[in-house]
Image: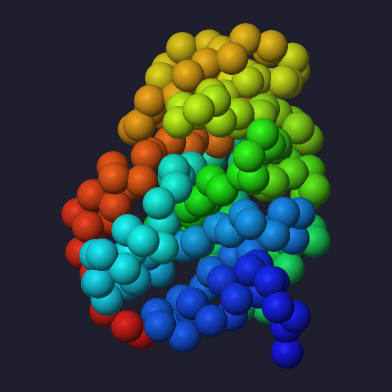
Amino acid sequence: MWGRGSEINREAYLVPLLSQRVVVSLSAMPSMTAHQFSLLTRQLAFGAEAFARRYPNCWLLWEAGGTHGHLSDVSLSVVETAVAGTRKNSPHPAGDDSLCFVLKPSEGESLRVGRALDNEVVIAEPTVSRVHARLELEGTEWHLLPLSEKRRTLVGGKVAFPGESVKLSSGVAVELGGVKLSFYDAKAFKALVARVPLRASR
């Protein structure tokens, strides 16, 4: 059905078979995938070592209910979340289920974050600029470079100004416009997922 090397399609259609939950794929960059948090709790329940091998990267978590100034869409169907095309079917937290972006750039690449659907990390909310910021990996450390001059960026509760790169520490809160995010390294994110009770299958 899908060609070899199509990681975006394997993530979107094979993983839900384990959990009966939705994995949201981003069409802009094949290595970028967004997961519903509840899906990850199920994957971790299948085996901690396998989870750690599968996800050795850092994460950006879009908090459930972490949008103010605009009402987010909820309860997106598989069809709606399979392809990022409009705000309605682009990745969003569903109800109380946070959306988690695994950060996997190729060497020397940065990840654009913003409202536009051709960004590597799509935050399709009107309070977020089309290209709001850029995530840059320097060695083993992630930095956030704000780009928007019209909409605010906060890191750890402090204003981050356009053009001034800010190092991200694990667990730090990030606000882009009216959207609340959190950054985690792989170890801290795995511990976060492990602390959340596994939801019963519907």
Position of the N terminus, as image quadrant, is: bottom right
In the rendered structure, the answer to whether residue 109 lies left or right of residue 189 reads right
Percent of width and height locating residue 162 = 68, 12
Residue positioned 50% across, 28% down in the render:
139
Percent of width and height locating residue 180 = 49, 35
Residue positioned 59% across, 51% down in the render:
72
In the rendered structure, the answer to whether residue 99 lies left or right of residue 105 reads left
Position of the C terminus, as image quadrant, is: bottom left
Q: Judge whether residue 33 can be spotted in this image.
A: yes
In the rendered structure, the answer to whether residue 12 lies left or right of residue 43 reads right
Front residue of this view, candidates 16 and 46:
46
**Residue at the extreme bottom of the image, as rendered:** 1
| Total numbered labels placed on residues in the image | 0
Q: Judge whether residue 12 can be spotted in this image.
A: no
139 shown above or below 61? above
Residue positioned 52% across, 16% down in the render:
166
99 shown above or below 44? above
In the rendered structure, the answer to whether residue 4 lies left or right of residue 46 reads right
Percent of width and height locating residue 89 = 70, 64
Percent of width and height locating residue 99 = 49, 54
Residue positioned 59% across, 65% down in the render:
24
